[in-house]
């Protein structure tokens, strides 16, 4: 790495960098607004104000709870099913080898084009959105969990046998710490993708939720609301991702 | 003995190397001061404990890194910034290019120099057969063992007809028996090319078996403690290990090295592994 | 064919067979799902009749442009970030959380800015694909073994020679991974965009068929898109195996 001498204390550097990025993003935004005008964008300050107004509006919160409910449910299902399947496929080598390319192939499909099937099966309600979120989020959880189990160093298992540990002890003291960091990474990715899945689902066939608010914004030419919602979603996503990433790093360092 | 005795091939004078890791951390005094003169055609080995600066010594001599003080010359000219034509280097790690066949690997350096195609073909074919790679010329490095890959790297250097060959623990990754046999290969190479050879190793038996002179290096910061003349004939091979003189020389080298090795081991957190040589 | 491959084939064929059975016997309602054989038949009819020509051309063109731009921008970005430590510090956290942010929500915004044409689609494809290429490029450049850089110096290679003769070939496996991901993401971004809000393309055709209660067409198109995605990725995968197989430790 570079051996530059910096005038600012090291631990503040990430904050300084983030501030720099934010500032340049906001400036670029303002500049773009100057070019395209009100019909297409609202400028940063106005969007901020609109976002604030939304946060005070009960209608907004109803949409938020619709999205949140679907998201929470799909995340829970994706996590549970994903970890379970991942563990099974990880321990049973052959099944893992069979499943991995199939799962990877599913991962590369534009799943939104399969959404109509989900709607036909689950109907036009929250269950369709949850199913869609699960479709998006479960695959990375499975893949990461599977790999976590596969990558447990055989040396660890030999050590456990040498120390004469029971199965439960082995699982708790040797296997768990070895696989948890990687599983967490899978959950982190699953979190983001489930959120994406739910929102995209709402964009297509829903009358409620944040995704709906955005699409509705374009249909009714209500750019200010659309942008305010996008801003709030982005803030949430970035905040959540930062926290999860920090936790991820901590887990990996300990593991 | 070797031909062309008396001509000075390379020289290090008062060379030190200090690694400056940034204003916060303490600078690492890795090497020196060292003085070394390499006469044309001689085979010198440098042996020392891990982390003593052997690799730094080699890289400074080669021009891969510049000394913090002192001077380095090759055939009378200062070595600065780039690796002089006429110096060949064999590295410790596998430096074969995995996307080229063995033949193309060996031809790599020659092609860069704009050598005519017939010339390239002749020289590469010769190097291939000299290093015993004939059956593998169209194979890729991934299909070869570690020892074979090192032979490819040696061939790649050989084909450029260097006057000074630098080898940085070239057999470090190989097992002991293979190493002894590879030592024979290097001796063959040396006799064939009549080049000056400097070989870095941490293995005492290798150092003693191969060299006209053994330079014993101290723990970091590496300095030369002693130069040991072996007196071997140029026809030597790995069978030298069977001689009594070999045992005596090895014992002597170890007696000088032992204390240094313990010093290197005692430095927790900085010992072998942080940076080799 | 290896044992794993045979089991995979069996699983996939088994899955299709089960669907076929359930739909033909009426266990699954025809209004929900039509038999796979009917999907394939209808798709064939549409292909032969030229009904898919227009949407195919649209989608292919959009994906191709998005892919090309993703690779170019991503590669350039990766090289720049690798070479400029300050830039690297700024972009590392960005790239680490990149795919955690649902950039797709910007799609309607892009329509507001560019209009309802191909550019929002391509832009979304690029937003998804370029980062993957940049990350892969960074990985590839980072992982060029230090000893190979020394080899370049030992042979006194200039900057251009070092780059084209050593660095790029050494980084090739990672760069290829970047290509695969870029293509997959570009494809997903474009088709998803077409599906959500667009006037043309395969994605739009699926949404339109859904809205018109035209199940046969809808399923035929879905089958086509799925087959296309698999074919594209499989092609790159095979190509990669061929190109890079001899480099792998046996």
Image (cartoon, rainbow, N blue to C red):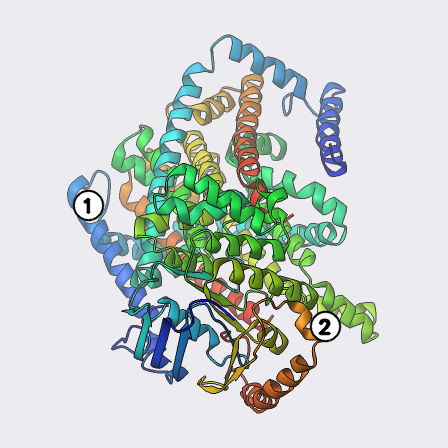
Camera-side residue: B101 or C178?
Answer: B101
Residue at the spot of label 1: A33
Q: Residues within 10 Å of mark 1 (few under 14, many from 20)?
A: some
The Cα–Cα distance between marks 1 and 2, rounded to whole angstroms, is: 56 Å
Q: Residue at x 43, y 51 (%)?
A: C135
Work out whether disc 1 and disc 2 sit on a shared chain.
yes
Q: Quadrant of residue B169?
A: bottom right
Camera-side residue: C161 or B196?
Answer: B196
N-term-proximal mark, 1 vs 2: 1
**Above or below B207: residue A17:** above
Q: Residues within 10 Å of mark 2 (few under 14, many from 20)?
A: few
Residue at the spot of label 2: A173
Say which element carries label 2. Answer: helix
x and y, in percent, of residue B46 in the image: 51, 77
Does residue A78 show up?
A: no
Q: Quadrant of residue A8?
A: bottom left
Camera-side residue: B43 or A167?
Answer: B43
**Above or below C86: residue A7:** below
Query: Callout 2: residue from which chain?
Result: A
Farthest top residue?
C49
Q: Residue at x 39, y 44 (%)?
A: B111
x and y, in percent, of residue A125 in the image: 56, 38
Does residue C183 show up?
A: yes
Q: Quadrant of residue C15?
A: top right
Left or right: where B33 falls relative to B153: left
């Amino acid at each position: 790495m570079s051996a530059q001498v910096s005038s600012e204390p090291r631990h503040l550097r990430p904050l300084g960098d983030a501030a720099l990025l934010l500032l340049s993003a906001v400036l670029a935004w303002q500049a773009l607004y100057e070019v395209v005008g009100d019909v297409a964008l609202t400028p940063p300050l106005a969007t901020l104000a609109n976002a604030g107004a939304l946060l005070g509006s009960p209608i907004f919160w109803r949409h938020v709870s619709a999205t949140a409910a679907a998201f929470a449910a799909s995340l829970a299902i994706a996590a549970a099913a994903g970890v379970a399947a991942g563990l099974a496929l990880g321990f049973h080598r052959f099944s893992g080898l069979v499943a991995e390319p199939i799962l990877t192939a599913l991962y590369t499909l534009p799943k939104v084009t399969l959404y109509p099937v989900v709607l036909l099966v689950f109907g036009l309600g929250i269950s369709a959105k949850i199913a869609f979120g699960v479709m998006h989020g479960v695959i990375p959880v499975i893949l990461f969990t599977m790999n976590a189990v596969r990558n447990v160093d055989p040396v660890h298992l030999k050590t456990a046998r040498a120390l004469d540990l029971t199965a439960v002890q082995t699982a708790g003291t040797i296997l768990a710490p070895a696989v948890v960091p990687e599983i967490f990474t899978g959950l982190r990715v699953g979190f983001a993708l489930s959120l994406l899945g739910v929102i995209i689902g709402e964009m297509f066939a829903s009358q409620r939720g944040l995704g709906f608010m955005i699409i509705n914004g374009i249909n009714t030419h209500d750019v200010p609301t659309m942008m305010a919602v996008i801003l709030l979603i982005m803030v949430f996503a970035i905040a959540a991702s930062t926290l999860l990433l920090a936790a991820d790093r901590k887990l990996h360092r300990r593991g | 003995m070797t031909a062309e005795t008396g001509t000075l091939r390379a020289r290090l004078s008062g060379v030190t190397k200090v690694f400056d890791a940034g204003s916060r951390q303490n600078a690492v005094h890795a090497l020196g001061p060292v003085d070394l003169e390499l006469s044309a055609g001689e085979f010198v080995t440098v042996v020392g404990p891990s982390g003593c600066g052997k690799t730094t010594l080699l890289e400074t001599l080669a021009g891969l890194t510049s000394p913090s003080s002192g001077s380095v010359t090759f055939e009378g000219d200062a070595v600065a910034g780039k690796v002089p034509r006429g110096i060949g280097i064999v590295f410790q790690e596998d430096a074969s290019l995995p996307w080229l066949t063995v033949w193309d690997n060996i031809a790599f350096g020659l092609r860069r120099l704009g050598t005519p195609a017939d010339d390239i073909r002749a020289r590469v074919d010769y190097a291939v057969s000299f290093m015993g790679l004939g059956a593998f010329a169209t194979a890729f490095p991934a299909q070869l063992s570690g020892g074979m890959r090192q032979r490819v790297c040696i061939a790649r250097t050989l084909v450029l007809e260097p006057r000074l060959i630098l080898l940085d623990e070239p057999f470090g990754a190989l097992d002991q028996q293979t190493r002894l046999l590879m030592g024979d290969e290097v001796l063959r190479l040396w006799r064939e090319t009549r080049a000056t050879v400097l070989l870095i190793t941490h293995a005492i038996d290798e150092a003693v078996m191969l060299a006209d002179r053994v330079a014993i290096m101290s723990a970091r910061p590496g300095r030369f403690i002693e130069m040991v003349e072996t007196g071997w004939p140029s026809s030597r091979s790995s069978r030298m290990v069977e001689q009594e003189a070999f045992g005596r020389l090895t014992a002597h080298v170890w007696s000088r090295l032992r204390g240094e090795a313990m010093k290197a081991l005692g430095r927790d957190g900085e010992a072998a592994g942080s940076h080799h040589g | 064919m290896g044992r794993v491959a045979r089991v995979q084939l069996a699983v996939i064929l088994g899955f299709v067979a089960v669907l076929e059975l359930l739909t033909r016997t009426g266990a699954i309602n025809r209004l929900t799902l039509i038999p796979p054989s009917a999907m394939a038949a209808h798709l064939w009819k549409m292909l032969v009749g030229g009904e898919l020509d227009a949407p195919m051309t649209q989608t292919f063109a959009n994906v191709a442009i998005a892919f090309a731009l993703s690779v170019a921008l991503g590669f350039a970005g990766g090289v720049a970030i690798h070479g400029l430590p300050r830039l690297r510090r700024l972009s590392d956290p960005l790239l680490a959380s990149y795919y955690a942010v649902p950039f797709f929500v910007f799609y309607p915004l892009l329509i507001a800015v560019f209009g309802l044409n191909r550019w929002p689609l391509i832009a979304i494809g690029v937003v998804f694909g370029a980062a993957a290429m940049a990350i892969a490029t960074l990985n590839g450049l980072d992982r060029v073994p230090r000893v190979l850089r020394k080899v370049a110096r030992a042979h006194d290679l200039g900057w251009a020679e070092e780059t084209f003769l050593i660095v790029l070939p050494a980084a090739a496996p990672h760069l290829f991974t970047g290509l695969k991901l870029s293509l997959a993401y570009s494809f997903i971004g474009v088709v998803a965009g077409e599906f959500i809000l667009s006037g043309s393309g395969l994605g739009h055709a699926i949404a339109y068929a859904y809205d018109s209660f035209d199940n046969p067409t809808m399923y035929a198109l879905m089958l086509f898109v799925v087959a296309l995605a698999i074919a594209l990725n499989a092609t790159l995968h095979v190509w990669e195996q061929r190109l890079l197989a001899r480099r792998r430790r046996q």
